[in-house]
Image (spheres, grey):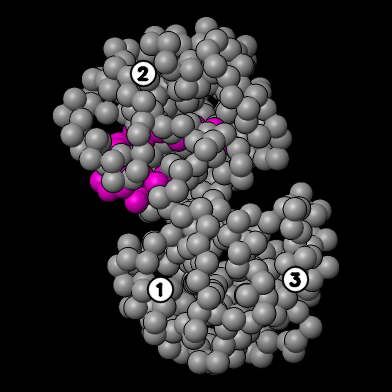
Amino acid sequence: MTTFTELGVPARLDAVLSDLGVTTPTPIQAATLPDSLDGRDVLGRGRTGSGKTYAFLLPLVARLAGGPAAAAKAPRALVLAPTRELVGQIEASLAPLAKAAGLTTRTVFGGVGMNPQITALRNGVDIVLACPGRLEDLIGQGHCTLSGIEVTVLDEADHMADLGFLPAVRRLLSKTPKNGQRLLFSATLDQGIDSLVKQFLHAPVTHEADSEQSPVDTMTHHVLHLEREQRLPVLVDLASAPGRTVVFTRTKHGAKGLARQLNRNGVPAVELHGNLGQNARIRNLEAFHEGRATTLVATDIAARGIHVDDVTLVVHADPPEEHKAYLHRSGRTARAGNAGTVVTLMTSEQVQDVRALTKAAGITPTTTRVKDATHPILVELAPGERVLLGAFQPETAVAVAKPQGSSRPAKPVQRPAGQSNARQGNGGQGNGRQGNGGQGDGGRRRRRGRGAGRPVS
């Protein structure tokens, strides 16, 4: 089995990976690292969750290590990503590598004050991880120049195209030195990505591994055909099983409302969408990462910014409008070789759209007609006991079990798996998860209960 050292990764960076438990290169890493470490321009195609982050961070850090310190306002490397969440995830992966190499880093994105970003750039920073809009603002105000960039990385280039960022990306790339190394990672080459490659990458080496259309052996797909009034009871039942769940909605308003409904029914849930301020985004993601909230309700814009390896269940509460969104949403589970389940809730009026959607995605799901939340398929999809919790306060991301009219916490109440827990109308407390369902990052758990269990790590 090939090791990172055999691919050319410096020993001290390989040691960092080993300390993090990363010892075996993924297919996209094994394919791209020899060329990227050799200084060549690389086009890497692979699905989200395939290990692309280390595929570009390792050669970037190796290239800069031991070089001169960055000059004021002139970073040495640039990583562009489409969302604040993704920038944050990349920074988290970069931090230990940069520390080992003695490099400084800075995130740059909107929604937060400019002054800390300006100060860091003025003091000199080796690696800037940025969203295009805020970086262009800082350059326009004279706080940053890209004339000293040695390595430029574009991550999730197709998603940047989806969000309309390609004109800004072109302007930024045109400000970097033509002889600099450029690494572009994307799931697809449509929507102008191919022209971006032709314009800015020099004799690039193309590698493809785990393409967007290739099947994931550890991911199973299901469609639950139900009536609209059963959506909430079914969601509560699925989300109140042990393990982490990500639920996707089409709109920001829908994500906010559904998170509140789940919390009212006792499922510790937080929301993630474009209307949230940066502090709220960070707080909610931390609560989800640490297991204090076991369900994250998100919109499509957040689909690529969520990186938690032990998400066991993804639910499309609203079927997405196109197949790429389905694949990116679904990619939140079955990561790093783990098992995962994807469930789409489909009402009768959505049958044709969902069939076309899954066909375009290359998926053949198992479809089940579900009358209510007592159907046994729910236990198969999310095994384990459902546990009642009291009100969950997303503002502080702390779950509190408390009966009405009492100042003392109540004991959790368990119900058999598969029993409906959602209350209609303005009902108070319902089911949620605690204990083994609230395990933090890095732990291992197995869902237990009736039906077929599946290993989860």
Taking 455 as reference, is 297 left or right?
Answer: left
Which numbered disc covers residue 133? 1
In this rendering, the answer to whether 14 lies above or below 422 is: below
Instruction: Give the residue type that dot 2 points to.
Output: Pro
How far separated are the C-alphas under marks 2 and 3? 52 Å
Q: Does the magenta stretch include residue 315?
A: yes
How far separated are the C-alphas under marks 1 and 2? 41 Å
Taking 378 as reference, is 413 left or right?
Answer: right
Identify the secondary structure beneath mark 2: helix
Taking 271 as reference, is 153 left or right?
Answer: right
Q: Residue under circle 3?
A: 8
Mark 2 surroundings: few (<14), some (14-19) or many (≥20) residues within 10 A: many
Identify the secondary structure beneath mark 3: loop
Identify the secondary structure beneath mark 1: helix
State which tag comes first along the sequence, 3 or 1: 3
Foreground: disc 2 or disc 3: 3
Which numbered disc covers residue 233? 2
Residue 436: x, y in percent?
Answer: 66, 23
Residue 371: x, y in percent?
Answer: 29, 12
State which tag comes first along the sequence, 1 or 2: 1
